[in-house]
Amino acid sequence: MNAPLSFAELSARQRVQHLLDAGTFTEILGPAQRVVSPHLALLGVPYAFDDGVVIGSGMLQGQPVLIAAQEGEFMGGGVGEVHGAKLVGLLRRALLVRPAAVLVCAESGGVRLHEANAGLIAVSEVMRALLDVRAAGIPVVMLIGGANGCFGGMGLIARCADHVVMSDQARMSMSGPEVIESSHGVEEFDSRDRALVWRTTGGKHRFLMGDCDRLVEDDVAAFRQAAAALLGVSRALTLDGLLAEHQLLTQRIARFEGCSDAVDVWSRMGLEHPEQVTDMEAAQMQSLRNEHVQEAV
Amino acid sequence: MNWQSLVQALFGDAHTIERSGDVISGAAQLRGQTLTVVGTTDHAAIGVETALAQAKVVLDTVQNHPGRAIVLLVDTQGQRLRHRDELLCINRYMAHLGCCVDLARRSGHRIIGLVYDQALSGGFITSGLMADACYALPEAEIRVMRLPAMSRVTKINEDVLEALSQSNPVFAPGVANYVAMGGIQSLWNGDLRDCMLQALSDSNLRDQRADLGAARGGRRLAAKVAQQVVSA
């Protein structure tokens, strides 16, 4: 057994290399092709030769997959025109080559402000392209484990996918805590209270609530194992499925009314020692969820 | 334009559209067609309840009125910025709305988005931007962020942003920029009924926005890059 290799600490390109079978990754529109954002240069901002997202094809346990990985170190993984178009293109390509899955290592603050309009439109284009892939019976798997989390438009995209895998260090949400704090004050959401931020948006809470399907340790091998188990496992969006989702989301509002903290939520779920959740390992979390959680739709 | 004037201009009295909280919904008649109308008003902050209420109308239409076209009316200040919404996973609620719209399209419903007042940031991604095509009134406002705030966050001088925004539609507020980039199909001028009927008859299952952006010169790379990836 190899020592764990932190998924969070790897670059996007390294994540792809470690997730896939050794030597199988072929990048599409890689840095050598210099497909860059024309807008950043106009603003005098550094640009990247891959526009912050690595895409391509490869094998996972001998099965063909398409893969994308956002680079959180470049503009926070923000979605601009080219970045978004690479994701859209990869998803459309999936309809042609029919891989066993499309894997997306999501690490993004959402729309890239420097290209805000293009990014906003691109996020919805990615959503539509993703749902086309999902409707074609090809699973889209979101792997969320980067230090920058998965926020804004990428948080929306993540919840359109067939499966969401997170590490306990990962966060998935809509608005960043800083934005909420600056809008409604520190009493609303103290963005510097790291424990509060993780309780609210982190992998453990999302897993207990069923908003992510698998919780893994911050180890690239664990992500690889989780992704491999989901190859070919598609969850079609149907009217019945969305009606059930609707019921689940409606009941959730009533069930957790008045809860002001994730610990209140876990307590109301029936956890005997909700205060211990933050210290638990991913494996313990699985048995806790099996006991207490309505299955996600 | 407020929603009552809009609905009056589109449907006269031939509708059952009512307001409940920030959500407006109902059925309307337009030259022999029955439409489902759903949306928000008062610059609604889209929270978990607002997203769910809109999703319910879309699901009800798919379930009970096969083929009926759906009109999404947009007036939002963006997603609700509250701790509680994040605790409940607001992105799942908003994505659910988007998935319901997508299911409706796949089930044979034409879906028209219309920004009749303002559309800010994430509030509109999973409604109007998930329609077959989204339109706007000329006086509508669409933006992610105003230039002064954008200047603070990006640390780029506001004068630089202002000057660049004259020639590049990629970041500055304004419906014209969204038209140039293909995110808005067109602005509705003149008789709104004619505009709606035209939109219904032009509705198309294929996402054409990147192609439109290229043809209009506002977004030159999106369609080209996506195609390069497909054919690589």
Image (cartoon, rainbow, N blue to C red):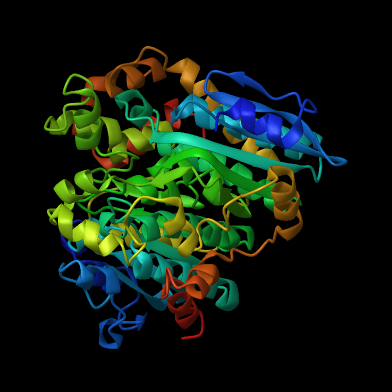
- Say whether residue B60 is left or right of residue B157: right
Q: Which residue is painted at 22% across and 71% down in the image?
A: A42
Quadrant of the frame with the N terminus of chain A: bottom left
Q: Which residue is painted at 31% across and 49% down in the image?
A: A150
Measured as percent of width and height from the top left, residue A125 is found at 50, 60
Measured as percent of width and height from the top left, residue B142 is found at 42, 46
- Say whether residue B92 is left or right of residue B202: left
Q: In this view, does A60 lie above or below B68?
A: below
Quadrant of the frame with the C terminus of chain A: top right
Q: Which residue is painted at 20% across and 56% down in the image?
A: A8
Measured as percent of width and height from the top left, residue B164 is found at 25, 64
Q: In this view, does B155 lie above or below B56?
A: below
Q: Is residue A20 above or below residue A201?
A: below
Quarter assignment of residue A283: top left
- Can see residue A212? no
The residue lying toward the viewer, choosing from A146 and B86, is: B86
Quarter assignment of residue B24: top right
Measured as percent of width and height from the top left, residue A275 is found at 22, 21
The residue lying toward the viewer, choosing from B111 and A223, is: B111
Q: Is residue B201 above or below residue A247?
A: below
- Can see residue B17? yes
Q: Which residue is painted at 69% across and 39% down in the image?
A: A240
